[in-house]
Amino acid sequence: MQSRNSDATPPVAVVTGASRGIGRVLALGLLEAGSHVLAVGRDVHALEALRCAASSARARLVCVAADVATDAGRARIEASITAEFGYLTCLVNNAAIGMGSLRRDYHDRPVTHAEIDDQILDRFLNTNARAPIVLAIRLLPLFRLGWGRIVNIGTSFNSMHRLGFIPYGMSKAAFESACAIMAAELEGSGITLNVINPGGPVNTPMVARGDQRQQDLLLLPGIMVKPVCWLASRAADGVNGRRITATQWNEAAPEAAMTAIGWPQLAADSTWQPPK
């Protein structure tokens, strides 16, 4: 791995799904923290609005219209990082689709298994599980400073087995499993991989409520900014394979908000041992 003077080189972060919701506030938060940001989204107009909102930022923002669920989109992201910055220090995998993409009133009328077909399952698994892992693998060679961060936006365990959440729940569970394995493989490399979940439903376009009063009671996207900016920084050196819950975040005691990625509480359930 090529190394540079990481103390003199500004951090560069990629944020997917940056045109709105959690991704938008994370892009702005990382800019404010001093990272150059490559903001990725599918909505060109929303990306332009993000560019306007960041006009006074002290770091540089580059907006890229791309769909991370396609190989062409991932290639465009890689090419843009190389052309604009030449290296990467942080990848924030935030882009995802939720149950609201199937129907807005999914909370009042849960989506049953009888309504789910191959195309729905493929779309959720590709966008929420496959695409972020493939993108991370593709961008690993761009972590050229001798250190790097992969920050994956997860979901609550409840969402993984909630009634009516088959495509979303299974895709996020698959993603969490891949994160645990990849983090273990990256151990000691200088590149860390961690998962952060908000700790509850967030008031974003992806999470729809039929009643606006109910929507207004959801968590604000900004709850994710401080822990993600911490994970993206050198302050988080050595923190790998951890799952952070944003509602429990306290920068003075970050470990209090962390568990291992995956389902460590279930590890004791397995008594099988490989034959000797």
Image (tube, rainbow, N blue to C red):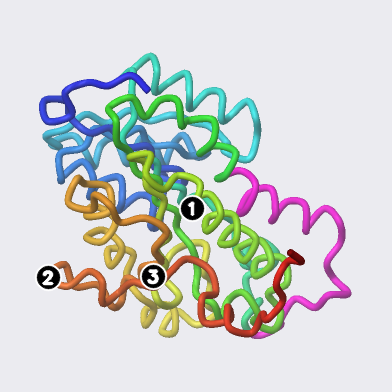
Residue 198's mark? 3
Q: Nearer the viewer, residue 43 or 83?
A: 83
Check disc 1 and report the residue beneath it: 184
Q: Nearer the viewer, residue 270 or 114?
A: 270
Disc 1 vs disc 3: Cβ atoms closer than 8 Å?
no
Location of the N terminus (image quadrant): top left
Q: In terms of image quadrants, where is residue 4?
A: top left
Residue at left 26%, top 77%?
Answer: 256
Give residue 220's position: percent from left, percent from top: 32, 70
Q: Reading the chain from its start, which is encountered first: label 1 or label 3?
A: 1
Badge 3 element = loop
Q: In terms of image quadrants, where is residue 147?
A: top left
Give residue 64's position: percent from left, percent from top: 43, 29
Judge whether 224 appears above or below 27 on screen: below
Residue range corresponding to the magenta coloring: 108-131
Disc 3 residue crowd, few under 14, some 14–19, many 20+, Cα 10 Å: many
Judge whether 236 appears above or below 218 on screen: above
Residue at left 36%, top 68%?
Answer: 244
Q: Viewer-nearest of labels 2 and 1? A: 1
Q: Viewer-nearest of labels 1 and 3? A: 1
Identified by mark 2, the residue type is Ala
Give residue 228's position: percent from left, percent from top: 29, 56
Disc 2 residue crowd, few under 14, some 14–19, many 20+, Cα 10 Å: few
Residue at left 68%, top 81%?
Answer: 271
Residue at left 62%, top 74%?
Answer: 160
Q: Tell me how far mark 1 sits from mark 3, CA to CA.
A: 23 Å
Badge 1 element = helix
Judge whether 153 appears above or below 10 on screen: below
Residue 252's mark? 2
Identified by mark 3, the residue type is Pro
